[in-house]
Amino acid sequence: MPQSSRALASRLLIQCEKSRSYANLVLDAAFKRESMAGPDASLCAALVYGVIERRRTLDYQLESLLQKPLSQLPAEARAALRLGLYQLFYMERVPVHAAIFESVELAKASPKSRHLASLVNAVLRRAQARGLALPEGGDVHALSVCYSCPEWLVSLWRGSYPGDYIQLLKHSFGPGETVLRVNTTRTTKEALAELLGAQRAQPVEGLPDALHIAGEGNITQLPGYDDGLFHVQDAAAQLCCQALDPQPGDIVIDLCAAPGGKSFTCAQLMKNQGKVIALDLHAQRVRLIEQGVARLGLTCIEALQGDARDAGAIYSEKAARVLCDVPCSGLGTIRKKPDIREKTRADLDKLPEMQYDILCEGVRCLAPGGTLVYCTCTLNPAENEAVCDRFLAAHPHFRAEPYQTLMPHIHGTDGFFIARFTYE
């Protein structure tokens, strides 16, 4: 018998908590396994993403309503309580009685939490009567609870972006805008906008071949998807490709390329003339690039498997342009990927050295006079300016243009960093 949306959401939240699995991966696998689609799948996804996104705020409520620590309750009871609170406080379309009743039923359904069903009922009713309670003040702990971000991230942004950190925290909740990059080798922006509907597809300022899509839903079901007329790509990533400025006939190397969006955009900017080498470490991610290449009909892209830190040995021909799209902490995409809120500071500390190594390897791939672009989808100076400053100190034959940091509340994009170097 198929599981209900809430029952599946509860099980997946427990799975994510125990194994630190990525929510999007466990959801995709579960929907295929359960043959769940349409409104049921949408509700389940909204619940899973929402609880993960607001977990610190929800747990703050629960700790004040429970007589013993939340961690001492069975995982099934914790999931039922969090789901109930999320629906009470953040899902206006869910009636109060439904939010409480369904959560009590979740507790009853598990032998591990059945005896706690009355507790779940009482806690949720007290929470509903009291309303959302948040700590006052602007200290790190209070901001962490209010914006459901780890304290280390609040401290990082407050120290690094003192004039913007509150807005960054406010804009850390999703969903972000969905932006399409038009496949200009097959259609035009105007034709695609007409196909999608003028009320739904709107132009994006500063990007001549991009469309903003209003509303939610499965992108693969949009008209033109199967015909390869577009791919999804945030405006920041498209601006990064503009900074690289690939030209028809160029050789371009995209390091750490999967799932391939920047390689696709480069090929389109090149009018599908020349060569784009899309390199990625993992075979399954290389296959993702190849699938995208086939759907979009881009014949100038060659996907290769290999470590970006050894790219010069994997592909020996020198490129006019090299894109170092390095693995990063992803803090700029937190509104789209709530799992990032579960990262620890230690997860970030190991990244700059790898990022620096990849940027230096990009030099081995670049022809004299060529252009090297370094980018991340994070807002963390240690992964951005510090890496690039270290690179320039060790490579005096490179000239840098002013670094560009894109912020959601200012630019309407993901948080993003772009550095452009010229090999002189």
Image (tube, rainbow, N blue to C red):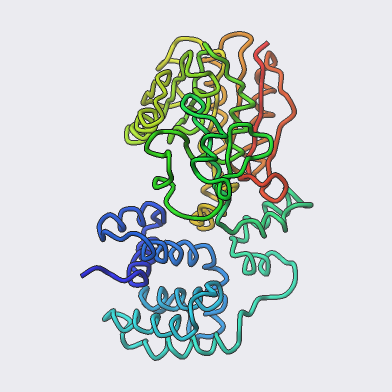
**Which residue is painted at 43% across and 36% down in the image?**
259
Q: Residue furthest right?
A: 163
The answer to which of 95 and 143 lies nearer the viewer is 95
Left or right? Give the position of 18 relative to 129: left
The answer to which of 50 and 152 lies nearer the viewer is 50
Q: Quadrant of residue 204?
A: top right
The answer to which of 188 and 62 lies nearer the viewer is 188
Q: Quadrant of residue 237?
A: top right
Q: Quadrant of residue 45?
A: bottom left
- Residue 13 in percent (x, y) is at 39, 65
**Which residue is painted at 37% across and 38% down in the image?**
226
Q: Quadrant of the N terminus?
A: bottom left
- Residue 129 in percent (x, y) is at 57, 89
**Which residue is painted at 47% across and 37% down in the image?**
231
Image label count = 0
**Which residue is painted at 54% across and 57% down in the image?**
341
Tell me if I can see residue 399 in this picture. yes
Q: Is residue 89 above or below residue 368?
A: below
- Residue 156 in percent (x, y) is at 67, 52
Q: Quadrant of the C terminus?
A: top right
Tell me if I can see residue 281 in this picture. no
- Residue 28 in percent (x, y) is at 34, 53
Q: Is residue 12 above or below residue 218?
A: below
Left or right? Give the position of 157 relative to 183: right
Q: Is residue 235 above or below residue 221?
A: above
Q: Is residue 47 above or below residue 276?
A: below
